[in-house]
Amino acid sequence: MIVWGIAGLLGLATGLRIGWALVNKQSLVSTAMILALGNLAAVAALSWQPLTLLVDTLVGWPNIAMAFSQIALIMCAAGSCVMITTVASARTPSATRSLALAQYAPAAVIAALSLALFFAEGQQPEMSPEEYLRRNLGASSTSWLLPLTYVLLAMSLVMWSGLRHSSRSRRGRALFVFTLGIALILVVTVLFLLRAVGLAESVEMGAAATLLGCAMVTVAVGALLPSIEDWFGARRELRIIEPLTAELGRRHPDVGIGVRPHGPLVFRVAERMSLISDALFLEASNELRTVDAPSGHGAADPDRVTEPLASAPAVSPTEQARAIAEWIFAGREDSPGSGHARFPGFGWLRQPDEYSDREWILAIARQYQALDRESVSART
């Protein structure tokens, strides 16, 4: 069951990458990640004895599942290598594609040679994966030397580049965890390679398999971490913008802000924020029309508006967001003096230079949420 748990984690990570590739434009990074995770999941699944026996029986060659494991491990290393070099590359798209093909080509050749060496050694009695490694991973067998050497070189590059480009950002943290898993795979590869050349006959297959399982789990967690953080982050952001969403949806139902978008949660949050932005500027435009209304047709209330076309305010971003939140909050139906909100001006709606559109909407929503909570506390 542990094996299937590991394979399931890797399969889930692969499925998420496939889903992301279907929703977004397919890229070399997505393809490489799918290749790396999918083949690593195959390595985990093929270590389960009933499955290896089934594969061997269907193909009609004893222990052929171990040859497939070799190929899967080679392609996992190739995919990881392409992924890490593509992410870190500043080359043109055509040069990046050429570099990826240059990395896939030797991996395909080595996989073919490994399969040929496996068949050249002839048929052996049917064995469990652990027993097969114990008997064949030694100086008397050469079928494992080539794939292990390639995996060692490729994973060394992946580990070096991954550690170099890790950071405290969301993607950087995921890359660091992924690289830790690669480092564990590298340790297992070194142990297997030393045993294959006869320098470490005492390497226990059970301990090495356990370490490889830990490496697979770490790689899966690293691949899943961005999606996990995105999901929890999106849930938190939905809670933050909910009060502001409800109020602006009441005022501007035609904008569609009250309609629940479909699709991944992160996309739904982004769409909701876009609708909030539209509703805020629509609300501000209504204020401007009120200011410009001719006498007798809704003349401006001097207590309700300030200079609507004022430039960006000379206050802190927190104070600026608070002013926008107070303007919206003062116009609520349950607010004292409803309908007499004081509009700070269009300049106050524009986000500060250090804020992105998303960060600015969140800043306003946090201040509005705080006002909402204060109002609830005051009534109770």
Image (cartoon, rainbow, N blue to C red):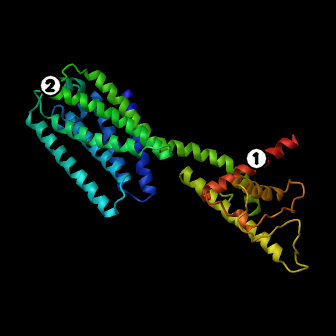
* Residue 375 coordinates in the image, percent (x, y): 83, 46
Q: Which mark is residue 82?
A: none
Mark 2 Cα-neighbour bin, 10 Å: few <14, some 14–19, many ≥20: some
Q: Quadrant of residue 257?
A: bottom right
* Residue 343 coordinates in the image, percent (x, y): 80, 64
Q: Is residue 112 above or below residue 281?
A: above
| Residue 376 visible in the displayed image | yes
Taking 125 as reference, is 301 left or right? right
| Residue 1 visible in the displayed image | no
Q: Secondary structure at mark 2?
A: loop
* Residue 237 coordinates in the image, percent (x, y): 63, 48
Q: Which mark is residue 370?
A: 1
Taking 209 as reference, is 10 left or right? right
Q: Is residue 200 above or below residue 262?
A: above
Question: How many marks are shown on the rendered structure?
Answer: 2
Q: Quadrant of the N terminus?
A: top left
* Type of amino acid under label 1: Ala
Q: Residue furthest front?
A: 314
Q: Quadrant of the C terminus?
A: top right
* Type of amino acid under label 2: Gly
65 and 362: which is toward the camera? 362
Q: Is residue 3 above or below residue 92?
A: above
Q: Residue furthest top?
A: 202
Q: Secondary structure at mark 1?
A: helix
The structure residue drawn at horizontal position 53% and vertical position 51%, both measured from the top left corner, is: 264
Residue ID for mark 2: 198
The structure residue drawn at horizontal position 30% and vertical position 46%, both measured from the top left corner, is: 81
Taking 315 as reference, is 183 left or right? left
